[in-house]
Amino acid sequence: MKSKIAFLILFLSPALLWAQHKSYAVHNIGYFFDAGISFGATFPKNNEPKAVVEVFTTHGYQFSKTFSLGAGIATYNTETINIYMQVRFNLRDINDTRSHYTYIALRGGYSWSTWTGDNWGDDKGPLIDPRFGWSFYTKEANLRWSIFAAPSLYQFHFIPKVGLAFEF
C-alpha cells in the first residue's frame, strides 16, 4: 500500500516531460505545479519524538506575478493521505528575471490515515501548514526550486519541518 501511494504521488508530477519546453526564469501567469519533499518531527505528549518525511505535489493557477492558488496531495511517512488548498504570495513583483526571491504560503486541508484493516481512515483531522520560503532560479538547468520552513499543525500536533520543492 505504501509503495502504491508513493508511486501515485510521483506519477502526478510529470515534471520531466513538461519542463523541457518552458522557461522558468519568471513565474508566468497560468498553470503551475510543484513537487517536493520535507523533513520534520512530531512531538506527541508523553512519547518520544517521531521523524516525519512528507512527499507532496501541488497543481494550480498563477493569477499574477505575486499570487497563486492551487490544490495538492501529500503523504507523511506513507501513513496518511493529505488533501489541501494552497495560497501563495511572492514577496517581490517578479517582472524581470531574478535569481531568487522570498515567498509566504498557507496550506489548509484534511488528512486520513492509510492503515490497513479495521483502522483505515480512523486517524483523521485538519492540516494547517504556513510556509516561509526562498525561491531560486538556476539558469544553466532552466530550473526554479525553493527551500522552505513550515511550522505545521497536523491533526492538532505541532510538526516543524524544512523542505525542498521544484517549481514548474
Image (spheres, helix red, strand yellow):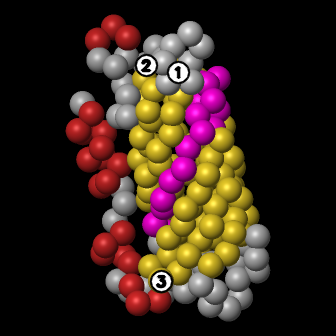
Q: Name which residue lies at 23% across and 38% down.
A: 3
* Main secondary structure of the magenta stretch: strand
What type is the residue that disc 2 sits on?
A: Gly
Label 1 or label 3, whichever comes before in sequence order: 1
Residue 46, image x, y percentages: 56, 10
Residue 89 in the image: above or below residue 66: above
Residue 22, image x, y percentages: 44, 85
Mark 1 to mark 3: distance in Å? Answer: 39 Å
Residue 27, image x, y percentages: 60, 79
What type is the residue that disc 3 sits on?
A: Thr
For mark 3, what is the residue?
Answer: 138
Element marked by disc 1: strand
Badge 3 vs badge 2, beta-carbon distance below 8 Å: no
Q: Name which residue lies at 64% across and 23% down.
A: 156
Residue 24 in the image: above or below residue 48: below
Element marked by disc 3: strand
For mark 2, what is the residue?
Answer: 121
Residue 155 part of the magenta-drawn span: yes
- Mark 1 Cα-neighbour bin, 10 Å: few <14, some 14–19, many ≥20: some
Q: If the image is split into quadrants, where does the N terminus sit?
A: top left
Residue 150 placement, left or right of 75: right
- Mark 3 Cα-neighbour bin, 10 Å: few <14, some 14–19, many ≥20: few
Residue bounds of the magenta highlight: 152-167
How many numbered discs, if any? Answer: 3
Residue 20, image x, y percentages: 35, 83
Q: Name which residue lies at 62% across and 79% down.
A: 100
Between disc 3 and disc 2, the foreground one is: 3
Q: Which of the numbered marks, if any, corresponds to residue 124?
A: 1
